[in-house]
Amino acid sequence: MKLGGVLALTMTLVASLCGPAAAGEAAVGLKGGGAMTSIGGDFGELYDNKMGLVAGAYASYYFTEYVGIQAELLYVMKGATGTLYDDYYYYDVTISLDYIEVPFLLKARFPLSDTFAPIVFGGPAIAVNVRAEYSLNGYHDDIADRVSDLDLGLVVGAGCEILMQPLMLTGDLRYEIGILNINESVAFERNHGLTLMIGVGLSL
């Protein structure tokens, strides 16, 4: 499934989420924040965390007061940093992996008042790689041919929703771990990291 297929699937789900409001609560909005990611696997001990940005949109639908689903379309900057060395020199390395990512999340919320509700969520995330670059002491090299086009991860997290009708403010912290090997060579490597986001939505 390439980028076009992922986007088509996302738009179909978003359209279904934003159906008749009488069936439940629906919302659409924008969100963004920061990600702290790294690469695990066969050479995971060589990598340190890399900071990146996350931005995108979401659509959510609650079937009941407590249970709902959410689809997101995000641009996520992942990768890792590290330091290589030989007998004489140290080399600063940065691996930059940017993705269009589509999480499909099951949500549970626990209203504490009419306006505030903590939430927990989890689900799979499909991602398409749109940039793969290797930087060594300032020298940049494209490594798209060595990075898998598709990635699949599992997401778990928690956050809160603040209702200010018709607006809804959101915040969440999530952890994602990749399932697939992103290295096209013989080594096994996978993405993982923490993401912190805030958002603003419109209740429908």
Image (cartoon, rainbow, N blue to C red):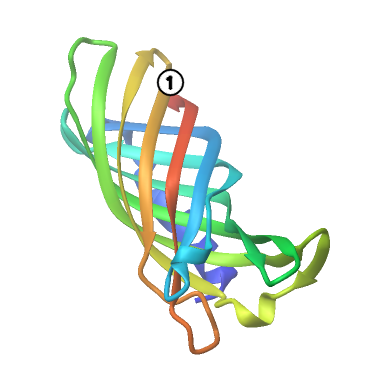
Q: Say if 83 sits above or below 172 in the image.
A: below
Q: Across the whole image, how many numbered discs are drawn on residues?
A: 1
**Residue at image point 29% right, 11% down:** 115
Residue 107 x/y as whole percent: 24, 40
Left or right: where does residue 143 sit relative to residue 65? right
- In the picture, which quadrant includes the C terminus? top left
Can residue 168 be seen here? The reply is yes
Label 1's element? Answer: strand
**Residue at image point 55% right, 84% down:** 184
Left or right: where does residue 139 sit relative to residue 199? right
Q: Quadrant of residue 60?
A: top left
Question: Residue 96 versus residue 47: which sits nearer the camera?
Answer: 47
Question: Residue 201 versus residue 37: which sits nearer the camera?
Answer: 37
Question: Residue 121 versus residue 34: which sits nearer the camera?
Answer: 34
- Residue situated furthest front in the rendering: 87
Residue 91 x/y as whole percent: 72, 63
**Residue at image point 52% right, 43% down:** 35
Residue 153 x/y as whole percent: 38, 62
Give neighbour class at mark 1: few <14, some 14-19, many 20+ (Cα, 10 Å).
some
Residue 178 x/y as whole percent: 39, 64
Q: Which residue is mark 1?
A: 169
Can residue 204 be seen here? The reply is no
Amino acid at the residue labelled 1: Leu
